[in-house]
Amino acid sequence: MEIKRISKWVVISGTLIIWSIKFGIRPYCKCDGSLNFFLGIAPNLVGSFLIPFAACWFFTGKNFLLARIFRIQSLNELLLVCFMGFGMLVINEYLQLIPFFRRTFDYFDILSSFFGLTVSYFVFWRIYSRVLFRYYPD
């Protein structure tokens, strides 16, 4: 149960960071160069970092079809969640090429999503294994 609580607070904190960047910092801060670039990719970086934590928070203890797909109980299942999440992120980015959505396609968003999800994979597994080891110290 502790991993679900940790995941909940990571997702809530990450969402607040994304909202503060998208709605607070980027519209009002006229930055130059690398800071402007980082503020452009930061929501994708943080959002992709949240994928395993959100899957754990929303689907732990549930038994419907989607929860069975996104259940994280082993390293292989975590890898599956990360691959499926990355696939959805790439599809979302390519859908931005459709002019109807009036969004901007950027390869750096895909790259930052990959980096955020890779870091999240290792961080989540580290936290998950520590919590699991604390309760089951065999």
Image (tube, rainbow, N blue to C red):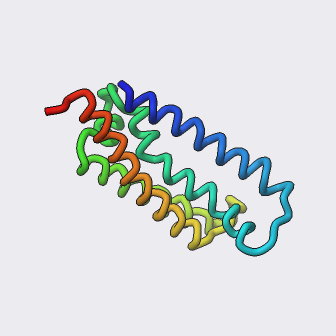
Q: Measured along the vertical axis of the image, is residue 12 above or below residue 25?
A: above
* Image x and y of residue 21, in percent: 72, 51
Horizontally, is 112 left or right of 37 in the view? left
Q: Who is closer to the viewer here, 66 or 123?
A: 123
Residue found at x 41% / y 60%: 118
Toward which corner of the image does residue 68 lie, by quadrant? top left
Above or below: residue 101 compared with residue 66: below
Q: Which residue is at 58% across, 43% downward?
A: 14
Expressed as whole percent of the image width and height from the top left, the position of residue 52 reads: 41, 45
> Relative to residue 84, is residue 90 drawn left or right?
right
* 71 displayed left or right of 87: left
Pinpoint residue 119: horizontal percent, then vertical percent.
Answer: 43, 57
Residue at the (62%, 55%) spot, across then down: 43
Rendered view: 44 above or below 71: below
Q: How many numbered marks have been drawn onto this rendered protein structure?
A: 0
Q: Which residue lies at the image location 58% right of the left edge and 66% below the top edge?
A: 109
Task: Indicate the quadrant where residue 19 lies.
Answer: top right
Q: Quadrant of the C terminus?
A: top left
Quadrant assignment, res 134: top left
User: If the image is split into quadrants, where does the N terminus sit?
Assistant: top left
Q: What percent of the width, then of the height, locates residue 56?
A: 39, 36
